[in-house]
Amino acid sequence: MVNRVVKSLMFVCVTNCLFITGLFAGGTWAVGGCFEPNESDRTVVEVPPHVPGEVIVKFVEQPGPKTMVSVETVIGIRVQWRTLRHAPHAKGMPNTPHPLSYYRIATVDPQADVVALSKQVAALPGIVFASINTIPEPTLIPNDPLFGSQWAHQKINTEGAWDISTGSTDIIIGIIDTGCLINHEDLADHIWVNDDPVNGIDDDNNGFIDDTNGWDFVRNNNNISDVYGHGTQVSGITSAGIDNGVGVAGIGNTTIMTSKWWHTSGSDSSIAESCYYATDNGAHVLNLSLSCQCQLPLTEDAVNYAYDAGVVVVAASGNAGSSSPGYPAGYPNVMAVGAININDQRAGFSNYGPHLDVGAPSPGILTTSHQGTTSYDSNFGGTSAASPHVAGLAALVLSVDPSLTPDEVRQVINDNADDLGAAGFDNFFGHGRINCAATIAALTPPSVVPDAVSIVLGTGNSGGIAELTESDNQYLVLDPEFLNFRYQLEFTVDATSPSETPGALEFSYESRTFSFVGAVVQNLELYNYDTAQFETVDSGLSAATDTVVSVTPSGDPTRFVEAGTAAMQARIRYENAFPFWVFSTQNLYLPYRVRADHVFWTISP
């Protein structure tokens, strides 16, 4: 972020909590100001920053007017109750009430002692918990022409990942942040567009009127403009256009859904509402570049809801430089991300500990800016900048395999991180610095192209090995030759596997037959090193159009890979299916021609 913005945001998004015991008899304040009755032996903490006069209340059942009046009668205070905005029902369950329908925000005099009030409300029958409305803050520390200046891409090897996939705009990242400059030149093509035009009607019936590109849960409207800048910076890291000829490159060409929890302030409730909204409206990944050294009970429910709905949740570990977890990164269903600087050291501000999953680049990150549609910032930092690198990678993973669960996405990212610090997992780097190329490669079996081709029967008309391994519309073209009164064609391909013990093996090739004699049989055989002979794995009529034949042999695939050398061989044979005589002086069968292309094996671990 530009320096003048940094200077205005030098506050740190954490609260140094002093531990106190025995604050209340019969109950305690948990971290974050959430009173839980009947746990008098729990360690308690100093109350963190919170919204004056507001208490979050979760009811056992959906509360009605009588329930509200009964609460007011017991506590002896007139309360203004506020519901939380949400969809009509839980995601994918039209007969199930939305989780937010069990919550209400109680607003009282701003001078009231909401700590004592929360304790009083929490002790009432029918109340799950009562909590002050905690205020976290964004975790900030002071062919794309700018790609060469993005050191982070070199560190996490995004270019290697892009050789396999640059992402999919079908994958949506919910950016839970300060809004977004949606017409920025590097973001405009990646902004989520909802089927709800600005016409004063809730066209998509999701509970929000005219939420064309997202929602502001602070001002409760559809204005997601970013006066603060943080959300636009985060969005550029995840999803700035790749190879679009302008600005910077994000981690993937994915879609940004803006769910705004902070305008000039924000709270536990606005974070949670933002998470529920993004989940209910189809986000696949949530990024929360925010943190508090305190519990966020409403947000915890929201991230668990997202996780249960199959959404990957990623959050900044926090900037306290502490081994105590910041939240929501400290919750079990959230990927916690620390910051690793350009020298592969843990950034001094970055929280650490056993809850940490991985690290990612920060500070000094070049990304999009809210200052103008062609503006970029060169010094974005904090764990706010680290988190969207991981969220972007999670979206890239889902672009390759959208069937993966949140746990599977988390596992493949952690397993393929570059180990830093002490060998294996450690509290300062987690599983290491993310490696995009290794992560994406782990999802995609390596392709093994042939390194030799031999024409056994028939004649090579044109083409060669290059045409078998490149998609250039050039082909290996073969004609059969006369042999034993039968026109036959056969060629073999040889290669070396990257593994002598593949978990699975698939052989694919593309071919077309030109024939005047009717049907031609196409046989695929792989060399079985156990029996020392070719084994037929596929046989059928060849096609008169370009057709890909792809076969996964049954049984143990290691029989097709030679132990010690990892050699592999394939033989493809053609012959007339229904030969007939023609009247000629030689009584020969009519010839045909075959062209072949894109021959390869794929090996799965």
Image (spheres, helix red, strand yellow):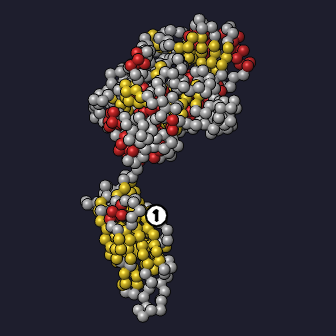
Left or right of residue 278: residue 410:
left
Tell me the quarter of the picture where residue 217 sits: top right
- In-image side of 265 versus 598 (left or right): right
Q: Tell me: residue 432, above or below residue 557.
A: above
Relative depth, front residue between 254 and 551: 254
Q: Position of residue 301 (x, y in %)?
A: 55, 27
Q: In this view, does 410 lie above or below 541?
A: above
Query: Secondary structure under badge 1?
Result: strand
Q: Which residue occupies 58% across, 37% down?
A: 193
- The picture places residue 90, in percent across and down from the top left corner, at 63, 34
The one nearer the camera, 349 or 27, is 349
In the picture of the structure, the residue carrying the numbered disc 1 is 548
Extreme residue in the bottom direction: 585
Q: From the top left corner, tell me how far across and down residue 505 is, in percent.
A: 39, 59
Amino acid type, label 1: Val
The image quadrant of residue 243 is top left
The answer to whether residue 47 is seen in the rendering is yes
Label 1 crowding class (10 Å Cα cut-off): few <14, some 14-19, many 20+? some
| For residue 364, side relative to residue 197 (left or right) | left
Above or below for 317 versus 163 = above
Q: In which quarter of the image is residue 107?
A: top right
